[in-house]
Amino acid sequence: MARESWSSRVGFVLAAVGSAVGLGNIWRFPWMTAENGGSAFLLVYLGIVVAVGVPGLLAEFVLGRRSRKSPVGALRDLSGSKHWGHVGLVSVLAGLVLLSFYSVVGGWILRYVGASATGAYFGTPGAYFDAISYGPAAAGYHVLFLGLTAGVVYGGVRGGIERATTIMMPVIVVVLVGLAAWVTGLPGAADAYGFYLSFDLAYVRANLLDILLSAAGQALFTLSVGAGTMLTYASYVGEDRSLPADATLVAVFNTAVGVLAGLVVFPLLFSTPNVDVATSGPGALFVGIATAFSTLPAGRLLAVGFFAVVALAALSSSISMLEIVVAYLVDERDLSRQRATAGVASVVLATGTVSAFSPTVFGFLAGTVVDVVLTTGLLAFVVFTAWVLGADAVDEFARGTRFSTGLGDAWRVLVGVVIPPFLVFTLFVGLGDVVGLSLSTWQVAIAAVAVAAVLVGVVVRTRRPFETPA
């Protein structure tokens, strides 16, 4: 059976942007920014996107196009070792984990689209969110959102994913731009822009570690790196073209949408009395903004438009999460796309329902598990790219570009030497917080460098020669 491919470069880029642009931009980004000092977080976040996110994204692109396989087959075939295939299997599990909470949030958003039209939450947005966030109704909307996701993936790469994302992404941008222009006239908009865009150096110095960890988790989450989604999408690239250019386009568009979302969200929050922006947390989108719409002229119409955009963004990302697992079953288990999609959707139907009934499970998956899974996954991809694929990764980097291999060599050093200690550092600190381990920043940094060096050393000593797939 011939493997599917994108019909055009535009289709691939928009699909990859769609994977990156999602709840990470519009739901999680404002929440994380508000909790970490506004623009102080924004600046650190942008730095991590450039220094870690884009090189990591490019590593996944290289692995995907080089192998023309999903994560399991890519790491196994490019290394000649079934053990690396087992590492790739973590990405498949990551897709299931991510969807198990993501589809619940997607269900919340679908419900808010309808509730905005009727004004169901106007007057008591906090009580409304508490009432619908978990339980039978949340499970029902989770099923609806999952059904929409599965329907697109069922249609295939060109007929489903590419067609849907080429429609959704322009709509998202146009509506966000319109909303960003409209909110400039709201009371409190100037204060909102000040909070969002002004830089507080004292705050950064006092809270650098917390900001760094939050920004790292957000950058990986919103760029959709570490879970194998970008590797899977790049595996459908059939022709030579510049992967560095494509990775840059994806990162720029994704970051622009995130910043644009902040220009909409914060003026809405600041225009609303009795909403504490800095402590609104995960409910910022559903309580703070919902409160704002309930007090504004034409609030129902604006709310429908806003939550419809959020729903499209969520759907574009959930599609890529489901595709990771479906691609694995199609490539490695020789299932038809239709059977694979139905089977995976059935599993997520069960696991997501558990999250819809349990705030504890939901919070664990949406917080700790996401950060650990994405960081570990990206660590595996960058180490593999630099030290197993090695010089061939540089060749793949330069293929379809006018860049010299010198730039590719610099990128390889970045992903193989600089980024791994940073990822191990963030992983150690995050896990230390979970288990209550108290270590100084310097102790964790030294340990991270040591572990990263040992990891690279083990990979170099045990790697096998391999043949490039035809």
Image (spheres, helix red, strand yellow):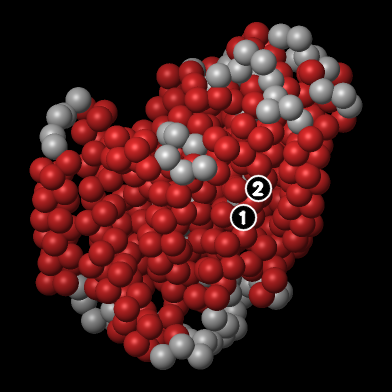
Residues at circles 1 and 2 in contact by the CB criterion of under 8 Å: yes
Q: Which residue is mark 1?
A: 256
For the N terminus, the quadrant is bottom right
Q: Amino acid at mark 1?
A: Ala
**Location of residue 242 with respect to 362 vertically, above or below:** below
Point out which mark residue 260 bears: 2
Residue 141 visible? The answer is no
Q: Secondary structure at mark 2?
A: helix
Quarter of the figure with residue 404: bottom left
- Separation of marks 1 and 2 at Cα, in angstroms: 6 Å
Residue 33 lies, in percent from the top left, at 49, 37
Residue 442 lies, in percent from the top left, at 13, 45
Crowd rating for badge 1 (residues with CA inside 10 Å; few <14, some 14–19, many 20+): some
**Location of residue 140 with respect to 212 vertically, above or below:** above
Question: What residue lies at 46% left-to-right and 43% top-to-bottom?
Answer: 199
Crowd rating for badge 2 (residues with CA inside 10 Å; few <14, some 14–19, many 20+): some
Residue 207 lies, in percent from the top left, at 31, 35
Question: What residue lies at 79% left-to-right and 52% top-to-bottom?
Answer: 174
**With 240 as the anchor, is 312 left or right in this view?**
right
Point out which mark residue 378 bears: none
Q: Nearer the viewer, residue 157 or 433?
A: 433
Residue 397 visible? The answer is yes
Q: Amino acid at mark 2?
A: Leu
* Number of marks: 2
**With 310 as the anchor, is 45 left or right in this view?**
left
Question: What residue lies at 61% left-to-right and 39% top-to-bottom?
Answer: 193
Quarter of the figure with residue 163: bottom right
